Image: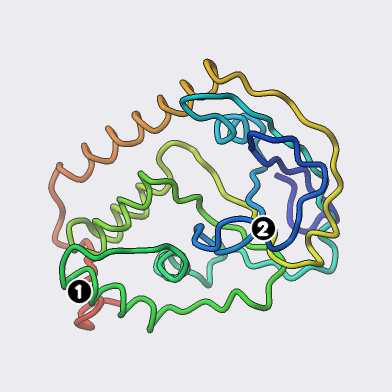
Amino acid sequence: MKSLKEKEIVIYHGSHEIIKTPTFGLGNPHNDYGLGFYCTPHLSLAKEWSCDAREGGYANKYLLHIEGLNILNLNDKKYSVLHWLSVLLSNRKISFDNKMEMDAYEFIIKNYPVDLSRYDIIIGYRADDSYFSYARDFLSNTISLETLSNALRLGNLGNQIVIKSPLAFSRLEFLGYEEADRESFYFQKEIRDGVSRIAYFANRDSGFSSDETFIIDIMRGNKK
């Protein structure tokens, strides 16, 4: 992806449909970053995300003119994984398995809030089902913050670029599309997810060191 200092970037949206004019207000409000148009700077990932077990799809290509837009980049040094997690927990529907998870959820929401309302675009990790299960493990005090941070880089899913505001939608220019064959790209997606899960569980089950930080440590004020 070009530097955010550039005036425009090329992005892709994977879908079962060809979407020439993305519409503000459509979609699932309980996605990672709420209601928005979810894209990636990587063509191959868009093709993977467009496919499911039954059919292939399309990688829609856009030029996004970003000059003058308010952009929230959750990879910025002033944010931590806990800020990303707060955003995720604020938008996803969650049923808690135990009190530890609920208490951790309430603590993160209260202490690491991020106001998305004034931003046109959000950039941050993509949390598919596997990644969300890693976050749940952190909430339940099963894995450390360090393990969670490493897990988010597994699979090379990169970052999502989420178009949030009417202004940002108006800055999208449709450049065309490429077809994604189900047999090729759904299989590729499953392989990527499987390799990530194996690496995650190997890391999780290898034990932990005394200097790692767990959510209970942060909640008790033992570590910042």
Q: Do labels 2 and 1 touch, CB within 8 Å?
A: no
Left or right position of 18 against 160: right
- Badge 1 density bin: few <14, some 14–19, many ≥20, Cα 10 Å: some
Q: Residue 66, relative to residue 100: is it above or below?
A: above
Disc 2 from disc 1: Cα separation: 40 Å
Query: Residue sitting at 63 percent across and 62 percent down?
Result: 122
Give the amino acid at mark 2.
Leu
Q: Between disc 2 and disc 1, whose residue precedes?
A: 2
Residue plotted at (83% across, 52% down): 172
Q: Residue 206: image x %, image y %?
A: 15, 42
Residue 164 x %, y % = 68, 64
Q: Nearer the viewer, residue 39 or 16?
A: 16
Give the quadrant of residue 50.
top right
Mark 2, residue position? 26
Extreme residue toward the top, this view: 183
Q: Residue at x 55, y 24 (%)?
A: 55
SS state under label 2: loop
Question: Which disc number belongs to residue 217?
Answer: 1
Where's the N terminus, which quadrant? top right
Image coordinates for residue 108, horizontal then vertical, percent: 35, 76
